[in-house]
Amino acid sequence: MKSMFRCPVCGGPLDKQEARYLCPAGHSFDRAAAGYVHLLPANKMHSKDPGDDKGMATARNRFLSGDYYAPLRDALAALALKYCPEHPAILDAGCGEGYYSAALFQALEAQGRTPVMAGVDLSKHALRRAAKRENSIEFAVASVYDLPVADQSADLLVNCFSPLALEEFLRVLRPGGLYFYVVPGQRHLWELKEILYDEPYLNTEKLTPYEGLSYLEVVPVDGTIQLPDPQTISDLFQMTPYFWKTPKSGKDRLDALTTLTTTISFRIHVFRKDTL
Ligand SMILES: C[S@@+](CC[C@H](N)C(=O)[O-])C[C@H]1O[C@@H](n2cnc3c(N)ncnc32)[C@H](O)[C@@H]1O
Ligand SMILES: [Zn+2]
């Protein structure tokens, strides 16, 4: 079966088979039992277990499965329906456990469209879950800075809270292709930050014009979520960058909470790649 992925050794097209991916030059990549494929060359692996580790992937999975971020999921799906052609090729760059990838894919299919979709992430722990969530999407361990995807092959590229690799994104997007870039809004998780820090700061919200891309719109997604127990609070905390930079006093205050009500706020920046 044709794949959206390209051979990470020679760049040739990959044929997706039952247990492996194979390029015409004979480079072969086994599919893990869980369904994803490892396409990150050994010399580009900077650690034995890159990306989100098992604990982080488990926390994110518990949290996202509670649908606290469903408003963002639904807004992304609505945008895919609004902008995608009938047979879109979609890439989720830094897809994590495929929560948003699966929603986009399923929303398009439910409308009778026929998307082909792939997701890449450095974390095999996240991809194991992604492949289980939606087995019609291809998932690969790979870096967003070196995507195993052909030039100008994607109609839509999605980047949700993952590293921004603009040059690569522009390479794989076809002219006229779409780019959805999800970033936190000004007051995202404000009440959580008030617990963690003596002087919390607001996120800066700004337009970020990139050469080669034109803005179509910025879609706000705002709401309030109620975290019902310490486990869910801790799961959310582990998903945030604050997990790495919170003083002990803040962490102690967080540990003492039994419930938390907090603002969620996202901005989906929607771009189209220029046609020259
Ligand atoms: C904050 S998570 C977002 C995951 C997913 N988009 C979501 O919102 O649920 C960031 C993800 O980026 C992945 N990641 C970090 N650096 C990466 C890289 N260079 N290439 C691909 N994925 C990367 C991590 O493993 C993690 O799954
Ligand atoms: Zn090859």
Image (tube, grey):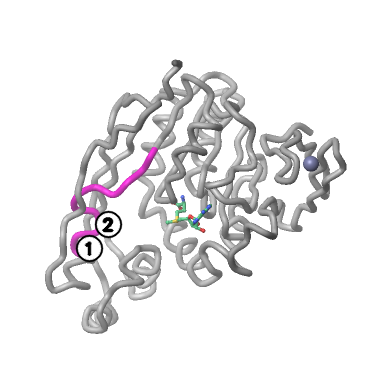
Q: Is residue 93 left or right of residue 18?
A: left
On-image quarter of the C terminus = top left
- Graded by Cα atoms within 10 Å as few (under 14), some (14 to 19) or many (20 or more), the crowding at tag 1 reads some
Residue position for label 2: 225
| x and y, in percent, of residue 234 in the image | 36, 72
| x and y, in percent, of residue 118 in the image | 61, 40
Q: Please give the label number shown on residue 261.
A: 1
Q: Amino acid at mark 1?
A: Thr
Q: Please give the label number shown on residue 100.
A: none
* Residue located 26% across and 83% down the image: 248
Q: Secondary structure at mark 2?
A: strand
On-image quarter of the N terminus = top right
Counting labels gives 2
| Front-most of residues 9 and 200 | 9
Q: Is residue 202 left or right of residue 208?
A: left
Marks 2,1: beta carbons within 8 A? yes
* Residue located 59% across and 43% down the image: 147
- Over which residues does the magenta segment extend? 181-191
| Front-most of residues 250 and 122 | 122
Q: Is residue 168 above or below residue 110?
A: below
Q: Which residue occupies the extreme right position in the image?
A: 26
* Residue located 63% across and 53% down the image: 141
